[in-house]
Image: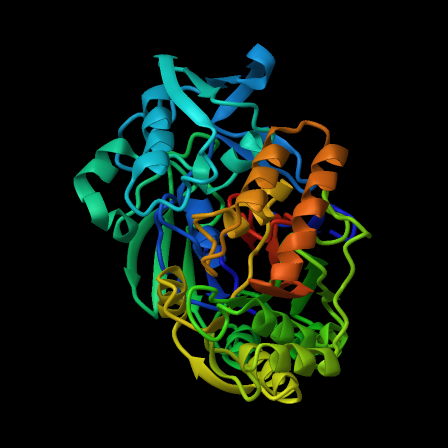
Amino acid sequence: MTYRTPTRTLLTLSLSLAVSGAAAETLTVGLDADPPRLDPALSTAFVDRQVMNQIFDKLVDVNEQLKVVPMVARSWKVTNGGLTYTFKLNTGIKFADGTPLDAAAVKYSIERNMTLDGSARKGELGSVKEVTAPDASTVVITLKAPYGPLLAVLSDRSGMIVSPAAAKKAGADFANSPVGSGPFSFVSRKRQDNITLKANAAYWRGKPALDGVVYRPFPDGDVRVANLLSGAVQVITPVDPKDIATIQKNAKLDVSTFQGLGFQGVWMNVTRPPFNNKLVRQAFSATLDRDAINKVVFLGTVKPAAGPFPPGTPAYSAAIKVQAADIAEAQKKLSQAKKTGTAFTLLTSPGAVNAQLAQLYQAMAAQAGFNVKIETVEFGTLLDRADKKNYDAVMLGWSGRPDPDGNIYDFFHTGGSNNQAGYSDPGIDSLLEKARAQNAMSARTATYNVALGKILDDSPYAFTYFSSNTVGVVKNLSGLKLVPDGILRFYTADLK
């Protein structure tokens, strides 16, 4: 269950216990991987966002109902037929290095995301024509064409504001010494061990109740839950399905499970054999029993996936059906391709759930005659190989975005920053660009459905399940609001 960077009903989910007179403490959080890149421009992993949301303020944010709300921008207006966004900023904000966060810093950060070599934000911001700062508290973004997802995009990494002074000084090393204006400031990191943050005493919205946050990577779910049970950590995410009942039985602990915005599945590399053959891709996808995956691996806590949009999210359509497993059809496709007995390597990252899932994929594919070898590599290495198309098939999902564009465009548009398959189709490109310019969600959904018809037939990606967010916590943690995007925001959190 690996994410690149969630909705039954989008309720306010909060772990709230009354706290009075509590002494400030440092919170230790167990994650399922070591965050690869703590740079908003370069990050492509969900686990990066868990840390960066504490370090960097954003132009806007989303709340528990996924509504865009003010953050650094206190207000905004859209004019000129949807081509001009004018943001009025809160004033007096400073970065952790003491330099001012003003309109010039916002302009620098957005333009950095648009132009930095290797930036994963270029697709998200591709509709931006220019960014101007007419005065210290005003930012104007002018678009080339109407782009409905802009505010949602700016509520995530594209809207994170970095210290220009620190970014220019650090250059390519900024990810190892990130400087923002958020409630917590970066102190240090030791790869595969910890990332340490301290409270920003001068934070413009008020000092956090916690003294700091320490993140520790535990790819093995058993190790994660053992650390929570022992008290070595106070929060873990995700929680493996088999461990939910164990946590719930502990009087000092609690667990919350809620459907996410994202999807999980398997990329197939269309740029090299065996998956440069559409029939072979179709055959592999047809071997996967999505219902069995939910029941066997996830104990009924996820939903079989038909595409990139989970039920309850804006572009979900019941017209897009979950593919049923069909071994006979898979064998027929392999025979037509003259690829009976096809061998390939399935790349995955560490963890008991990932191992079980990979073995299930392996067994299902074997029924049709595939010979699947499983290769396990560290998460950062997996991302690097996926980006470089150095793989046959890779288990890699997406944490999801509030606007549906964030779940489809960069994955299936030619040259998209998350297009790990190397998939390219001019007709799909046109449809995804059309959807970006449409205002009514009903119209966008109809356009997406046309695109998905061909994408699912071409099968560069086998959608398998819609992921859930699971968080295990100590009960004496208060003020932690759980937003459906799965990002834990610790500014309002406190320990007794």
How many marks can you see? 0
Q: Residue at x 52, y 75 (%)?
A: 224
Q: Position of residue 423 (x, y in %)?
A: 49, 56
Q: Is residue 402 visible?
A: no
Q: Nearer the viewer, residue 71 or 274?
A: 274
Quick check: 150 above or below 49? above
Q: Position of residue 441 (x, y in %)?
A: 73, 34
Q: Residue at x 58, y 16 (%)?
A: 78
Quarter containing the C terminus: bottom right
Q: Is residue 241 left or right of residue 96?
A: right
Q: Is residue 153 visible?
A: yes
Please name the colour scheme applied to the rendered image: rainbow
Q: Residue at x 67, y 75 (%)?
A: 241
Quarter containing the N terminus: bottom right
Q: Position of residue 151 (x, y in %)?
A: 56, 30
Q: Nearer the viewer, residue 386 or 255?
A: 386
Q: Position of residue 415 (x, y in %)?
A: 43, 48
Q: Is residue 205 left or right of residue 403?
A: left
Q: Is residue 117 left or right of residue 276?
A: left
Quick check: 220 above or below 455? below
- Image quarter of residue 62: top right
- Image quarter of residue 110: top left
Q: Is residue 471 left or right of residue 86?
A: right
Which residue extends farthest right? Answer: 318
